[in-house]
Amino acid sequence: MSGRIRLALCAWLATLLAATALIPLVEPTSWLLQAAALLGVQTAVGALARRVPLSRGFTVFAQLLVTVLLLTASFAGDRALLGFVPGPDTLNAFAELLRDGGDDAGRYAPPVPLSDGIRLMLVSGVLLIGLVVDLFAVTLRSAAPAGLPLLALYSVAAGIAGGDAGWAWFLLAAVGYLLLLLAEGRDRLAQWGRVFGGPVPTRGGPVTAGMESGRATVRVRTGHRIGALALGIAVVVPLALPSLDGGLLDRERGGTGDSEGGTISAVNPLVSLQNSLNQPEDREVLKYTTSTPDTQELYLRIVALDDFDGSAWKPSQREVTDVPAFLPTPPGLSPEVARRGVTTRIEAADWYAQDWLPMPFPASRVDIDGKWRFEPVGRTLVGDHEQTTRGARYTVESLIVEPTAQQLANAPAPPPEFEREFTKVPASLPDEVAEQARKVTAGASNDYERAVKLQEWFAFDGGFTYDTEVTAGTGSAAIARFLQQKQGFCVHFSFAMAAMARTLGIPARVAVGFTPGSPGANGEMSVGLKDAHAWPELYFEGVGWTRFEPTPSRGSAPDYTRPEAPSAAPSTEARPTESASDAPSTAPSETESCSAEQKRLDGSCGTTAPAVAAGSSGDGGPRWQAVLIGAGVLAALALPFLPMLWRSRVRARRLGSSPGRTEADAQARTLAAWRELVDTAWDHGIGPDASETPRAAAARIVRVARLDESAAGAVRRVAEAVEQTLYAPVPRPVTGLGDEVRTVRGALRAAVGRGARVRALWVPRSAVRVVWAVAERWTGLRVRVSGAVPSWAGALRR
């Protein structure tokens, strides 16, 4: 075997051994086999190019070209010419995969699931490092500098993974690098002979063997120095590298395992929360069953962020202890405050590796296997020695605390040391934040009223909109910017409300976790990525840490924070109101043919006569062909009018004057009027946004259409009626909504140009709902047919 081939094989092996440091980061490890195969082809191409021989530049170009072709065939073959020649579509495919891989890397905790994007990042990274190593060690015949790209590969992996296991990967990478150095040394000895020491000849002296040995000695010593330096850096650099962000809501290390349990460090949920909420697929994170039929208050809390240093909210560094059999009573909770116990059985997904344990707050007992530690101030459990939630099954006994508005309003001042710790604000917080807090809470007589005013201002009165695409930070300046721009998602709302509450002297912190999720099969609740959430917790003596919900269209506002709560009946009476809000989709049960889509559209079904009655049977005989032809002609002539006729019919049904007989009928008419208003705005160019609350949607319609005061008032009154129907414990019937919608329709028509008015009349955008309804019925029909046809018939048909 020639020296260059031996050196190329050692370069291939050294790159693979350094790449093993990435094994703890991704699961499964099949990517490494693919990387080894492609790297082997890349190395073989370099060896063949050097035997031709080609110049160094052409050798590297040939390797790079083959690498691109291999990656194209492996990851974008269906969008490439002949399956391996890249084109414009291939570049788009690579961009999409790399973007998805970056999102996955920032969203999941190590080990990250091996998606196509992650696989492309790993394989292409290893091939790139391998190309550079081959360039230095084989093409340029200088193996010592090849340790630098190997160092980069190992250092990134060690910096992300951390832990004692990194030493094993370091030893493998070091062995590969040393083999590379030894192969180069053997190759040099084969060319120059054995190296003997001796004085280096002076300038102008004769060229002798001693001179050659001197040059070889200088080369060998230089290689040894570079090798020693690279190995030293490889040891030191990972110690200085911080762990990179990873996992949903940032995966952080837990206790150290000593008698005190060590300390816990900070998390920054901004990026991971935003990534989770923007995912196109709502992947399931947790599922649980619980003993309470009302899951509205069952938020699954992960960690409390109580330290605001001006750059971000994060948990204070605190000691953790062993998990006690029964967790201590929540601080500040008085026996006079009503509470009820809840038992919740939770199962985490196999891919979800989180150091912090999601559980209802406040927990009183946790039954879980593994190495977990308890942080008493935040009342959180954190994994110890790489313990995570991956596939965990555990049971949590917790309390649902039900204070009254009067108890919160009469809460005494908290202990002085407690107040000092949880009302601290950094000097960098702009004065405008405190001034806005005082302005919003003007007229409030106690901290409870101030807190409710802050919540209502963010959720309804302040003109804020929910937007997960906003790229704002969490520091002091970012909070002030958010209060000006009034766009953000749950992180911004909770951070801003907690900061403003602290400026008012109310102890506050931010909790990060999940909303209760949605009902699943067999009575289970399912929690997905898009249920990730952040909310503020404010402290009231006698009640303890109390949840508030300032984020519009997310979560649910607790009963004790609603203005109607002081005079309302107990919370058990509020539940029929919630079910009543669903009544418009189920009340008109007289018409069995009413589809679910029609119920969502109109809130009632009414008659379901077909829009075109032509084609009914005639007298028979030979005239049937003429009848069919005539019906076809009439249908073709009527086709352009169908969208307009459909909208007119739906509008008349929604805004009909029939008052109905029951409360459910009145609620259905209110929701139907709101849907008609939203569709009218849609027809005139203002599309619907399902994430907005009625009040936020109304504000956007008024702002975009620039409606006059009369029409703007009509929009707001319809939105307020909808909020009464959906959220009030005892909704008040509202009349005249049809006239309000007609007023808005006239104002919208006047606000747009002639072309927009013609389009809204003849080609209304909301007519797409017919397509949705047809697709839903077709899907339902296919499901019923496939279930009715025996399996053997399906096999024969195939």
Image (tube, rainbow, N blue to C red):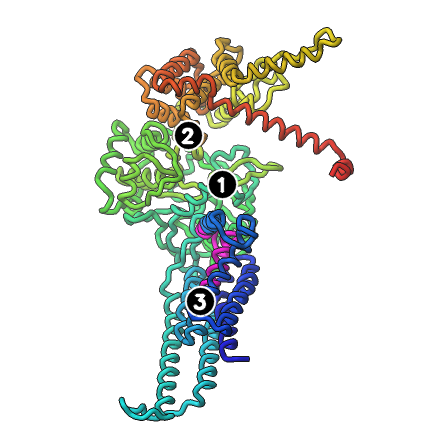
Mark found first going from the N terminus, 2 or 3:
3
Front label number (3 vs 1): 3
Determine the secondary structure under disc 1: loop
For discs 2 and 1, the disc positioned in front in the rendered view: 1
Q: What is the three-letter code of the residue carrying label 2? A: Glu
Pointer 1 residue: 280
The spot of residue 434 in percent (x, y) is 24, 37
The amino acid at mark 1 is Pro
Q: Disc 3 on helix, strand or loop?
A: helix
Label 2 to label 3: alpha-carbon separation: 58 Å
Examine the image and state in which quarter residue 1 appears: bottom right
x then y, percent, for residue 689 = 43, 30
| Mark 2 to mark 1 CA distance (whole Å) | 18 Å
- Determine the main secondary structure of the stretch shown in magenta: helix
Is residue 346 left or right of 494 when viewed as pictured? right
User: Is 640 placed above or below 305 here?
Assistant: above
Which of the marked residues, 3 or 1, is nearer the chain's N terminus? 3
The residue pinned by badge 3 equals 58
Residue under pointer 2? 692
Q: Secondary structure at mark 2?
A: loop
The amino acid on which the numbered mark 3 sits, given as a three-letter code, is Phe
Mark 3 vs 1: CB contact within 8 A: no
Mark 1, other Cα within 10 Å: few <14 / some 14–19 / many ≥20: few
Mark 2 is surrounded, within 10 Å at the Cα level, by few (under 14), some (14 to 19) or many (20 or more) other residues, namely some
Left or right: 130 as drawn, with respect to 428: right
Residues in magenta, as a range? 102-129
Residue 507 or 524: which is nearer the viewer? 524
How far apart are the two marked residues, 3 and 1, measured between alpha carbons? 44 Å
Q: Is residue 127 left or right of residue 635?
A: left
